[in-house]
Amino acid sequence: MSASLSITQQEVRRRNLSLVMHAVAGFGPLSRASVAARIGLTRAAVSTLVDELIRDGLLIELGPSRPGTVGRPGSALQLNDQGPAGLGAEIGVDHLAVCAVDLSGRVRARAAYETTNRGRAPGPVLDDLADLVRHVSAQAEGEGLRPAGLAVAVPGLVARGSSAVVRAPNLGWEAVDVPPSLSSLPLTVDNEANYGALAEMWLGGDPSLRDFVHVSAEIGIGAAVVIDGRLLRGTHGFAGELGHMPVRPEGPPCACGGRGCLERYAGEEALLRSSGVDPAQAAARHPGPGGRIAHLAERADGGDQRVRRALHEAGAALGIALAGAVNLLDPQKVVLGGGLSPLLPWLLPALERELDLRVMDPGRVGQGAVIVSRLGPDGPLLGAANSVIQACLDDPTSLRAGGRGAGAVP
Ligand SMILES: [Zn+2]
């Protein structure tokens, strides 16, 4: 047998194992016969693959799926809820969070704490994160899970295919490498907006959602573009910088070197400034992640006209920027990330009006082209953890000794 033939056979086997895992993940519990029918392989071939997956601790066999039937009943297969765990971590401007999900994407352990990371040296932030990862890892092991990989979401630009944070302006980080020593697990680092978008695709509840623009806002405005189920990364990994789309060419200068960028109107700091709200006071009134947004929502709800005007302006700016993205990419939907939810009653009308005015297919806005994520502010964290699980489903052999590791993001 030639080496190339053997590599091809290994690839085919890997792909078939992945087809079985995805079938059970998407439609389980399933009998072997149902898996075979779904993926178009013979029942004998599927049985061999299933035996391998059970041996590796990825699938478990439940009792007979149809008790009382004549002949050998088919046993139902499901994902092993004591199998691999995906660890996700989030470095926020004002918090750190880590969670562990099982093969079904269920959160089995989590920990978070509030801290001010802005302007803090990266070393101590990463040390704190490493402690949190160890803690959640131990919790997951206590649940009988095997942590398989760690994915870290950061609010900044990450060089494509690396763990190098090129720039995270809201943390004050420049050229920071997230070191592999953060944990003993295979490590992936990506922009939080990318993980937010992946979470929406995997967990948002609409399996037909494959082409969309996902907008997230913590302190800055981030976005990610998913085309045909895959992230658009761009040459350097920097695609999706919607926050630096110019909405008023003569507007105020932006940290990026341009003027009148979306972030200068709809970013959290810009919103607080134009609302006349002192950020420290807002944070004191509503401590914790999302506190400043909650404070703005409370003021708008209470009838504060200055806050409502600022939100209206921000909504219009978002609509203008998104019209550019929609005309360029023709997505199924624009998804607004969960962090923005509290402000939507005041943002959305102006956003939809500008979008409707400017897109080539105006009727689409009225037909629900703009939706709000149901995942809340947890989207990026869940997306990170689930990216490890998706890598396991895509290559079930990655967990074996000498495998490629389960940290790769699709
Ligand atoms: Zn800018």
Image (cartoon, helix red, strand yellow):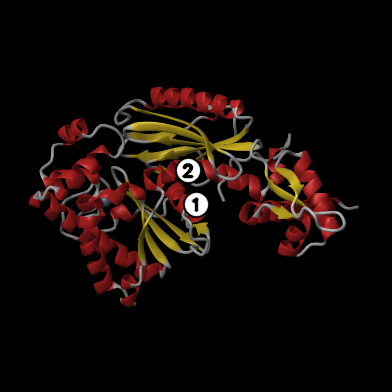
* Residue 140 percent location from the top left of the image: 57, 30
Bin the neighbour count of mark 2 within 10 Å (Cα to Cα): few under 14, some 14-19, many 20 and up: many
* Residue 393 percent location from the top left of the image: 65, 48
Which residue is located at x 70 percent, y 42 percent? 58
Left or right: residue 132 versus residue 32 is left
Bin the neighbour count of mark 1 within 10 Å (Cα to Cα): few under 14, some 14-19, many 20 and up: some
Which residue is located at x 75 percent, y 39 percent? 56
Quarter occupied by residue 240: bottom left
Q: CA distance from mark 2 to mark 1?
A: 9 Å
* Residue 327 percent location from the top left of the image: 35, 71
* Residue 115 percent location from the top left of the image: 32, 27
Q: Earlier in the sequence, mark 2 or mark 1?
A: 1
Task: Return the residue at label 1.
Answer: 203
Q: Which mark is residue 382?
A: 2
Three-letter residue code for mark 2: Leu
Camera-nearest residue between 398 and 42: 42
Q: Secondary structure at mark 1?
A: helix
Camera-nearest residue between 236 and 295: 295
For the image, the number of numbered tags is 2
**Vertical comparison of 264 with 401: above or below:** below
Q: Is residue 49 visible?
A: yes
Three-letter residue code for mark 1: Leu
Q: Is residue 187 visible?
A: no
**Vertical comparison of 175 with 393: above or below:** above
Camera-nearest residue between 67 and 396: 67
Is mark 2 in CB contact (under 8 Å) with mark 1?
yes
